[in-house]
Amino acid sequence: MAEKMVDRVMRIMKNSNQIRNIGIAAHIDHGKTTLSDNLLAGAGMISRELAGEQLVLDFHSDEQERGITIDTAAVSMVHTVEGKEFLINLLDTPGHVDFGGDVTRAMRAVDGAVVLCCAVEGIMPQTETVFRQALKERVKPILFINKVDRLMKELKLTPEGMQERFIKIIEGVNKFIRSIAPEEFKEKWQVSVQDGSVCFGSAFHNWAMSLSYMKKKGISFKDIIAAYENDTWKELAEKAPLHEVLLDAVIQHLPSPVEAQKYRVPKLWHGDLESEEGKALVNCDPKGPVYFVITKIVVDPQAGEISAGRLFSGTLEKGQEVNLLLGKQKLRVQQLYIYNGAKREIVENAPAGNFVGVAGLKALPGETVTTSENAEPFEKIKHLFEPVITKAIEAKKPADLPKLIEVLKKVAKEDPNIVVEINEETGEQLISGMGELHLEVIENRIRTEKGVDIKSSNPIVVYRETIQNPSKEYEGKSPNKHNKLYFEVVPLEPGIAKLIKEGEIPEMRVKKKDEKLWEKLQEGGMDSKEARKVKDIFKGNILVDATRGIVHIGDIMEMVMDMFEDVMSAGPLAREPGINMKVILKDAKLHEDAIHRGPAQMYPAIREGIRGAILSAKPLLFEPLQTIRFEAPADFMGEISKLISNKRGQLIEMNQDGDSITIIGKLPVAEMIGFSSELRSATSGRGSFSVIDQSFERLPFELQDKIVNQIRQRKGLKVDEMGQAVPGGSS
């Protein structure tokens, strides 16, 4: 009797040298899910005839309707090379920029990435974005150039023409790796046709090639072109099946967990590498303490919450007691699963180096689950883009309100790029996302999958609060008048702000000596003494403890960090998040008796002190801007330029290539609501755009008062209570 796939997976997963954890990542519509189908067909998990049409890993109804991947899907399969079996844990990730957070989380779980690139379109903005996400998490890439059939059928290229196009794409990819990869991998991770780390083919027609495979099978470019000219391309799929060529390349070029964790763990985990935990993590030791990082949560109607993620060390077992480091609680593992697309197979235990699902952990994505006490969590998963669009959501029937609140809490777990704010006082529910499509998909899922009929407001833009000048020293007093804290707020050094945005400086509470962090802060322009006093880095802001010789400062520091994070999440100007601020605790007078400096006394004092300092430093709003790449026929150059200038945008670059143009512009998100339909009508439906980057810049001075007042009115805050908060002191 043939061995079941789950039994084969269970057998191989015990040998971490024979595991490859890989992600498939690319620009939207470059063929990731079609490719995944072919890999599944090759492993005998779906029929070959349906591969490329079944789209097994797009199992949500909205993914099938829209023809795009919205959620990362996981599958484990077995591939044999020269008689040796390997376990491939594959994650198929979304390509649309609004779902980029899913890509970032998937990159924490994998060690290698197959980056797809369309042979016709070449490197697109989202290709660069997924590369950036992979390299930031120290994930090694290989390249698959897809849709080669279009070069022959549509563009009628010669073998020389095809090779030129491949060289251009490969050079572009290598240039990008050189500019972004960590120093030690800039040259090591270059992709090349010669060594087989570049494959090309057609996922739709189920064939692929690499140079080594062409030599082995005696196939040339001319044979590939002839197959399309004579309509015998089906034979290519027999001679060079895609799954065989690509998975051979994956096994040869992408690292096993044992190899990868040696260089990934020191970047992603800031604990002591010489400790028992550190050694177990670096060596991917199945006998060490359990360290499991949750990258995705799926709420299953029958099984409840399933936390999927990467097991970096130890062995997870059913019934085991584990600690949630961020959630600060102990829980039991109720069930363990390995993945097979929409299906899950139950297993009794899983050793280090694997991607598994766990039932029974009420946690959030990014959580570190461990059997160690007081352990150091993994670095927070930092997304490239932040939520910039918000909508107010309410249930159509008042009776559905409790159900809606439950559903929103689940949605926030399933997609951590959605920020859900439930205001118990005003009864308002807000959801913030990456863009209009992101929120539209979430609303649709609340209605169809979660069964709550809702209505939503027009989209609202999320701003950021910052300061222009250093503040005066400001005193915060506790309600009992026994404790006084003195704060100063100054603009953050631009070099440090840049390093935080790029993920070079991790956002975290600093609990111990961290030489690497101090070096980075100094590199960003901070004085070496001050760098050693940094206590908390949160959402692009920094807290510094500059006090000296205060006996009880250690007892209240956690509370200072709590309230620093609280004020940075909702600033005093318009209760919008803070950005680029350095909060310095200059001095403190604390009561001797601990009972008089509990949270009820300290929290108001700290909050009042930080807010007061910000209000004395000329606060102002920053607005989100997106750098957009437009593509359209050259005739519409004038229309697109006009559209950009009408939206308070700036035109950065314009290139013409034959009959088509590429324009890069920077536009305020506030002006981009409903932008897709305006672009369609301006270009007769022939223009498209994609987001390259996102930044926050100062809102024009003449709009500051108006927007601050609008936000305050919307949030039910008094418009006249602001003192010197409004720029220009106009209230």
Image (cartoon, rainbow, N blue to C red):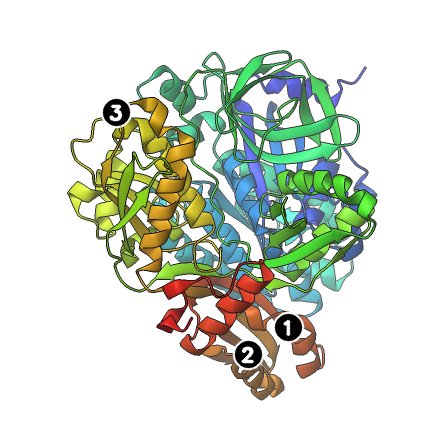
Would you call the spot at circle 3 few (<14 residues within 10 Å), some (14-19), or many (20 or more)?
A: few
Give the residue type that dot 2 points to. Answer: Lys
Which residue is painted at 50% across and 77% down in the image?
649
**Which quadrant of the view contains residue 562?**
top left
Quadrant location of the C terminus in the rendered image: bottom left
SS class of the residue under badge 2? loop
SS class of the residue under badge 1? helix
Q: Nearer the viewer, residue 711 or 272?
A: 711
Vertically, is 543 above or below 620?
Answer: above
Give the residue type that dot 1 points to. Answer: Phe
List x then y, in percent, for residue 632: 61, 78
The answer for how far apart the CA atoms under marks 2 and 1 are is: 10 Å
Quadrant location of the N terminus in the rendered image: top right
Instruction: Determine whether, in the image, residue 230 is placed left or right of residue 174.
Output: right
Circles 2, 1 touching at the beta carbon (< 8 Å): yes
For label 1, the residue is 675
For label 2, the residue is 647
The answer for how far apart the CA atoms under marks 2 and 3 are is: 58 Å
